Image: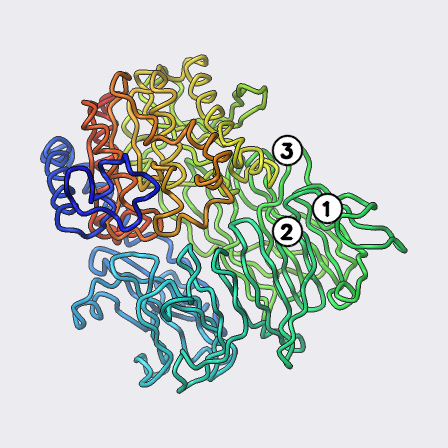
Amino acid sequence: MGEDGRVSSPTTTQAPDDPYLWLEDVTGDEALAWVQERNAESLGVLTGSAEFDELRDGLRAVLDADDRIPYVRRRGELLYNFWQDAEHPRGLWRRTTLESYRTGDPDWELLLDVDALAAAEDENWVWAGAGVRYPDYTRALVQLSRGGADATVVREFDLPTKGWVTDGFTLPEAKSRISWIDDDTVFVGTDLGPGSLTTSGYPRVMRRWRRGQPVAEAEVVFTAEETDVAAFAGHDHTPGYERDLVGRSPDFHTTEEYLLRPDGTQVLIDVPPDAETDVEREWLLVRTRSPWSIPGPGSAGSAGGSGTEHPAGSLLCFDLEAYLAGDRTARVLFAPTASRSLSHHVWTKNHLVLSVLTDVVTRLEVLTPSRDWARRDLPAGPELGSVDVVGVDPDQSDEYFLDTDGYTRPSTFLRGELGLESDPEPEVLRTAPARFDATGLEVRQFFATSDDGTRIPYFVVGDPANTPGPTLMTGYGGFEIALTPGYSGVIGRGWLARGGTYVVANIRGGGEYGPTWHTAALGEHRHRAYEDFAAVARDLVDRGITTASQLAIHGGSNGGLLMGVMLTRYPQLFGAIVVMVPLFDMRRFHLLLAGASWMAEYGDPDDPEAWGWISQYSPYQNLRADASYPPVLVTTSTRDDRVHPAHARKAVARLREQGHRVEYYENIQGGHGGAADNAQRAFQWALVFTFCWQQVGRRT
């Protein structure tokens, strides 16, 4: 029981002095009544005006626009797309041919209408993806979420008849992992009761499940430790290189992977635990996340011995079978520098494409194994912009699809085919229209200096003539996720077009400069991410771009934690703070939903040494009644089964108890994204912009 007599969370021993544990009961009657009261109070403040309605409707128009680019992924001879609009808020899964797509008005073949399905079954279905079976592409494992949660229901779908497979592969709601092996077999990990899940709530046991067999009777192929994040299994169907891989993730940043031989034996791919591996045909690619010293020829031992040291962020290539036999001869495919990092790589049939960040701007390089890994640039992408590989066809061809954009440059969708010596100019398939008037807007990159002297890049988007003026700033700084330039009609319509300036801070903890940028803010060094963000805020003021009273900030998830730390540690730097689907109570984050999987990022609060540094920044424990805080808006989702909504609820309850001004909105649907459809997304962002304009400036 909580101190006020309400029913609390089952796990209360770790925080006996917390009077708001009852808010951890996600769908409890009293908790939801509290949510409804808070929602009503804040919606009364933020909605109901003609200005709010205009903003919401304008954002909805952006999200539902018929002339948006319908991005596609190739599966065999056809291109697949999932589409949501005003008439189909839950979405349509459909496909077409390349020839038809090129016409600009494709003849779409409808596969599944999620709105019709939800109505027929009286379920709040949200599309969560589909795995189409190789090589015939006639069956799919469709995943549907209730209200946008991470947990999904899995059903087998027959594409020729466009119907569900009777007695096919089906799973009830769970955070399952499932993938095809062949026509009648899949790898699966799901919730089968005690012992089947890790403490993080993900599958612990992977099975080879044959058609018609009860899943609980399927052959177990791998079992992870209960304290691991998850187990995994997958099948490589590349002709001539068919194989199975299994393994476990001991924590969020480490992996132990094995080749699963036909006789059931497991062969360890012996790389550093924090390295990322990619087995492709005869090659093993290894991306290092920490320095790796590889012995030279004739040296005893393996990783960790004397020899050539490859820095964190390198991409190395080995012959797979030779590597398994002990040969550590490596070819360096990418070596990082102080300004360049490898974001990711993808294969086509005959080439390897590298996505490289240079001071947070994306460029592509192509390597060709058959030509001794010859390297060349793949020109695409605007200055101070991004280019993303959104689709390849490694099974069949060297086709690729690209999306290029920038903060003020709408997306262009291109298709190309790589040649063995030179690459034809990619074909422009679609160009998105502008969603806001960018006249007078400039994109600039600056560098702030953090407390320890590190240069922190950040982008400023806006009209220099409107400075100092209302500014909205965001950041993330976690899990090696990089915030790269990108076009947002929502930000443009709701903020930039109304005279605001938008800022993106590329702080440590992210992946903007590779794994070293991330690890610089791990665990006991977490404070560096927060110092970086504060340094950017000060630099904005020093440059005359804004003032503290005109600076609003927003962030979600780990970025919501960032906002909480800004509130408690640096409140004087900001005029308003928006905290979205946040982590907030870092004393209990590892006990709530998927929180245990993030201890590699933050530390274990049950470890006194780790709690020593976590307690210094955990927002919930550092809220003070005698502090002067800027106005705060907190948002979350009841259906968020990744970051528990109690983080947001308890933050608001504590702030209210202490007499601080705080608005709150909890969407009953939406999952970790906070919204399940475009109407909800438009409504939520209209709340955010309305709140920020009220606090730091008015529209021009």
Q: Position of residue 226 (x, y in %)?
A: 47, 60
Q: Is residue 178 left or right of residue 171?
A: right
Q: Is residue 401 visible?
A: yes
Residue 132 at x, y percent in the picture: 44, 73
Disc 3 residue type (three-letter): Ser
Quadrant occupied by the C terminus: top left
Q: Are marks 2 and 1 in contact (CB under 8 Å)?
A: yes
- Mark 2–mark 1 Cα distance, whole angstroms, equals 9 Å
Which of discs 2 and 3 lies nearer the camera? The answer is: 2
Task: Determine whether, in the image, residue 645 is placed left or right of residue 70.
Answer: left
Left or right: 41 with respect to 269?
left
Quarter-of-image position of residue 241: bottom right
Tag 1: Cα neighbours inside 10 Å, few (<14), some, or many (≥20)? many
Question: Marks 2 and 3, Cα distance to the nearest angstrom?
Answer: 21 Å
Q: How far, Cα to Cα, is label 1 from label 3?
A: 20 Å
The numbered disc on residue 339 is 3
Q: Amino acid at mark 2?
A: Ala
- Which residue is label 2 attached to? 275
Q: Looking at the image, is mark 1 or mark 3 earlier in the sequence?
A: 1
Q: Position of residue 500 (x, y in %)?
A: 32, 25
The vertical placement of 664 against 61, above or below, is above
Residue drawn at point x = 40 percent, y = 78 percent: 216
Q: Inspect the image, locate mark 1, and give the three-letter code of the amino acid beneath it.
A: Trp
Question: Which marked residue is nearer to the observer: mark 1 or mark 3?
Answer: 1
Closer to the camera, 578 or 614?
A: 614
Label 1: which residue? 292
